[in-house]
Amino acid sequence: MAYDNAALLVMDFQQDVIAMLAAGGSGAAVERARAAIDGARAHGLPVIFVRVAFRARYPEVSARNKRMSVLRDKGLLRESSSGAQIASELDPRPDDPVVVKRRVSALAHTDLPTLLSANEVDTLVLAGLATSGVVLSTVRQAADADYRLIVLEDACADADAEVHRLLMRKVLPTQASVMTVQAFLRELPA
């Protein structure tokens, strides 16, 4: 697969999210995401970080939005909180774009589409927490926007390992190539 117009999206690797998904393998996913970041940078692929964060008092969260209401009620992912920051192990650089979102998909109501268009990106390589959240939602929306999609199976995790397995084996392959980080790194040009 050609990666000339590809970008690596590193989505929701934040302290609060990592803690919520610890039982589902988020620690291992952080390590694999780090390997994907290093490989992408070594081959000149842009790395774009995506994080979910809310303003103080959560004015973006509707009581009708079940998923976001849970985060609000637990006081998680406030913009300035340490829990909303990108995991330091992933070494975000000052020149790496960071997209802030208020919903599940990385493409919904963010400036990510503008970043991708301006850089002529047509292929998205996805790493993210959680598989049933940001990964699934972003794949669905990006597929409808005609992006070529690759999901790095071992750089994703979910609170429910069975849901992760089902999505990676049955659902996501209908719209994306699903592969390990090692397979992705082997495909990058020398």
Image: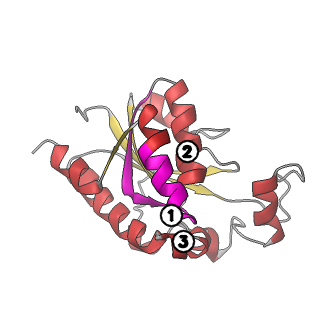
| Circles 3, 2 touching at the beta carbon (< 8 Å) | no
Quadrant location, the N terminus: top left
Spatial CA distance of label 2 from label 1 is: 15 Å
In the rendered image, residue 154, in percent from the top left (x then y), is placed at: 36, 59
Residue 122 shown left or right of residue 54 in the figure: left
Spatial CA distance of label 3 from label 2 is: 17 Å
Q: Is residue 149 rendered magenta in the image?
A: yes
Residue corresponding to mark 1: 161
> Which residue corresponds to the image point at 50% horizontal and 56% vertical from the top-left?
164
> Which residue corresponds to the image point at 31% horizontal and 32% vertical from the top-left?
5
Spatial CA distance of label 1 from label 3 is: 14 Å
The stretch in magenta equals 147-169
Residue corresponding to mark 3: 18
Residue corresponding to mark 2: 136
Identified by mark 3, the residue type is Ile
Nearest-to-viewer mark from 3 and 2: 2
Identified by mark 1, the residue type is Ala
Of the image marks 1 and 3, the number of the one nearer the N terminus:
3
> Which residue corresponds to the image point at 78% horizontal and 72% vertical from the top-left?
75
The one nearer the camera, 68 or 111, is: 68
Q: How many marks?
A: 3
SS category of the residue bearing label 2: helix
The one nearer the camera, 119 or 65, is: 65
The one nearer the camera, 190 or 31, is: 31
**Location of residue 89 (image quadrant):** bottom left
Label 2 environment density (alpha carbons within 10 Å; few <14, some 14–19, many ≥20): many
**Location of residue 92 (image quadrant):** bottom left
